[in-house]
């Protein structure tokens, strides 16, 4: 099955909607995975079709290979969002159970700090944060898309 850029665009939009629904259903780990996947799909939509690029889920490499028609302000917003996603997401989340993700957040110090109030569920907070970053990527991509 051949995937064209517009397929990635539509997939990005669908995955983001699914991530929102999963988060609302307290399915935080899967919501995090799907939110990151939405950003990956959007970046793939902006990689030139004649490119022989394969980043293997490396969001930084995908962003570098993609060609977004953006001004400097939007480009900064995009880079900030992708940086935020890279801290919280990687493709192996699809194999992780909730306890493992909680342990990982604790190990890297993201079970506390900005946005985590006393008694708050760090996984829930970081899930919402990842979704927010992915939403920026999908929103910018959708707004600048030209078939």
Image: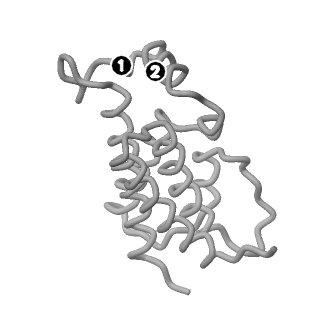
Q: Of the two numbered discs 1 and 2 on the same chain, state the one appearing first in sequence.
A: 2
Residue 92, numbered label: none
- In the rendering, at what x and y percent does residue 50 appear? 77, 74
Which image quarter: residue 114?
top left
Q: Which residue is mark 2?
A: 102
Q: Is the residue under label 2 in contact with that under label 1 (CB below 8 Å)?
A: yes
The residue at the point 33 percent across, 25 percent down is 122
Q: Is residue 121 above or below residue 35?
A: above
Nearer to the camera, 46 or 100: 100
Between the C-alphas of marks 1 and 2, the distance is 8 Å
Q: Which residue is mark 1?
A: 111
Q: Is residue 17 above or below residue 143?
A: above
State whether residue 72 appears in this view. Answer: yes
The residue at the point 57 percent across, 68 percent down is 11
Element on which disc 2 rests: helix
Q: Residue furthest left?
A: 118
Q: Is residue 126 above or below residue 139?
A: above
Left or right: 92 with respect to 89? right
Question: Quick one: quadrant of the N terminus?
Answer: bottom right
- In the rendering, at what x and y percent does residue 48 appear? 68, 72
Mark 2, other Cα within 10 Å: few <14 / some 14–19 / many ≥20 = some
The residue at the point 33 percent across, 42 percent down is 128
Q: Residue furthest top?
A: 107
Nearer to the camera, 60 or 139: 139
- In the rendering, at what x and y percent does residue 22 appear? 42, 49
State whether residue 80 appears in this view. Answer: no
Element on which disc 1 rests: loop
The residue at the point 43 percent across, 59 percent down is 137
Q: How is the image coloured?
A: one colour
């Amino acid at each position: 099955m051949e995937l064209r850029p517009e397929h990635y665009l539509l997939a990005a939009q669908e995955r983001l909607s699914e991530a929102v629904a999963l988060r609302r259903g307290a399915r935080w780990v899967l919501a995090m995975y799907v939110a990151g996947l939405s950003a990956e799909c959007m970046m793939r939509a902006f990689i030139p079709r004649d490119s022989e690029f394969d980043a293997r889920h490396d969001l930084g490499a995908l962003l570098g290979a993609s060609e977004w028609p953006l001004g400097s302000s939007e480009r900064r917003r995009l880079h900030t969002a992708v940086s935020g996603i890279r801290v919280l997401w990687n493709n192996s989340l699809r194999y992780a159970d909730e306890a493992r993700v909680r342990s990982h957040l604790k190990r890297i110090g993201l079970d506390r700090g900005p946005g985590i109030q006393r008694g708050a569920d760090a996984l829930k907070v970081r899930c919402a944060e990842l979704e927010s970053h992915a939403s920026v990527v999908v929103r910018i991509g959708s707004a600048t898309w030209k078939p």
